[in-house]
Amino acid sequence: MRRTAPSEASRPPGGDDGQAFVRRDGAAGPRPPMTEALETPAAGGSGRLPWSVRVGYGGAEMLGTATWTVFYSFFLYYLTDYVGLRAALAGLLITLGTVVQAVVAPYSGVVSDAVTWKSGRRRPFLLLSGIPLVVTFWLLFADVGLSGAWLFVYLAVAATLFNSAWSFEQTPYTALAAEMTLDYDERTNLVSGRSVWSILATLVGMAFPLLLVGWLGGWAGSERAGWSLMALAIGLAGLPCLLLTWWVTRGRELHPSQRTGLSPRDIWDALRHNRTFAWVTGVYTWAMAAQNVMSLMVVYFTVHWMRWSEQRTSMFFLMTALAGLAWIPVINRSAVWFGKRRAMLFWNVWGALFYGVGMMLIRPGDAALFWVLGAFGVAGLVAGMVLTWAMIPDCTEVDELRTGARREGLYYGVATFVQQLALALVLWAVSAGLTWSGYVSGEGAGAQPDGALLGIRLLTGLGTALCCVLTLVFTYKMPMTAARHAALRAAIEAKARGEEVDLGEFADVM
């Protein structure tokens, strides 16, 4: 039997989904037609966004990505080499925080879908979560004078609070992109602008922590105090950029007052009834896993295998971040020319070869080769960030055609939920692998046994390459293209006009 969307005559009063629309003032009434939302000047639906908006939207990345980068790149290293925890126990703390983030992310997305504040559904969360995120990030590295079991409990609570605050800042913020423009290619441009900020924040989160720890630790009289002051400095530096995003996105939400009724079942339905989203979630999961494995292990690789100082390691991270920034226009252009799917396939093959082969060939004396590997291999990781965040907004239109509702927060939350659960397992495996390889906590460069050094190389190179290969598998199965997205948008507009739409024509993406 042919599945069809209900015509205007058969649709219940109140809206496409049979629910009465609730206006910002709380009164019930008919849902505004979709075409009205597309034609409002604030929405800018299918047109190009102003340059200032495309640039300013990414400002929130400076706080979210910088703190996230420090957490996943240095927290394990801080716990093993400065606090003295075993790698498996330290990894358990990071895994705990990641699981908390996975649980909180969909909830924060659903909450942002449901609120109807005057300033929009997503933007208020930028203001509400900023200071809690800074404070909880500082608590992760604060030296509170505890030891033993009490130190573990304190760190577990701090990791839980930090990851919860991070989810309430990042999930509504990333969902905002899907509401700012409906155009397939303009979303790539918007996310590319955001990615510039993300790379700059990654630069801050990778290149400066060890330098700041040395400088501030010398000023304060202890390395542990240096870590605490470093976290506070990076957190406070990101707040003005968060406010920039809040300022430039005023009036840019396409549906600032649309309330959607959601239930826990909707989280499962998002994956079950949206084939495009299921595959994109897999792409996002493993692309981010590749970034996290590399971020987590590269500091061990440089300090213990290459036997570099922490200052030289910081310079390597700085160069890598700058190279990643330079790759963004190339990656963006490849997506426009060849489509997001083909571009993602190419760049993940690139990353798998550079890291899977290159990391295993490098020896401690191959400094020049390592610099080249860092400059070129990073393109595969950057592409995973740029292209996956440009793919997720396209999935929300599949849901809109099926349900008549805009639920960006739900989809970003569910994507983060699945990705973070997978990431928790990956991080646990990496930290456990360090322990099983014989890694000795608290030892300096060159003092690790041969088994631990081999484990560091395998986890850094082959671990990252394996995640790139899994990203390739999910990308290959992804059905959404520019042509299919255009047809999807046309069907949504036709449905809004009361025309009958054959949903069977979109079975490949549903």
Image (tube, grey):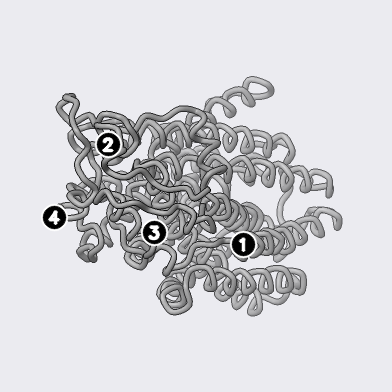
Based on the displayed image, in which of its 4 quarters is residue 15 positioned? Answer: top left
- Does 353 sit above or below residue 174? below
Judging by the rendered image, the residue that carries numbered circle 1 is 477
Judging by the rendered image, the residue that carries numbered circle 4 is 41
The kind of residue on which mark 2 rests is Gly
Between 126 and 403, the residue placed more toward the observer is 403
**Viewer-nearest of labels 1 and 3?**
3
Helix, strand or loop at label 1? It is helix
- How far apart, in angstroms, are the residues tagged by discs 3 and 4? 23 Å
Judging by the rendered image, the residue that carries numbered circle 2 is 15
Inspect this view and state whether residue 53 appears. yes
| Mark 1 nearby-residue class (10 Å; few <14, some 14–19, many ≥20) | some
Judging by the rendered image, the residue that carries numbered circle 3 is 488
Q: Earlier in the sequence, mark 1 or mark 3?
A: 1
Q: Is residue 83 left or right of residue 214?
A: right
Q: Earlier in the sequence, mark 3 or mark 4?
A: 4
The kind of residue on which mark 4 rests is Pro
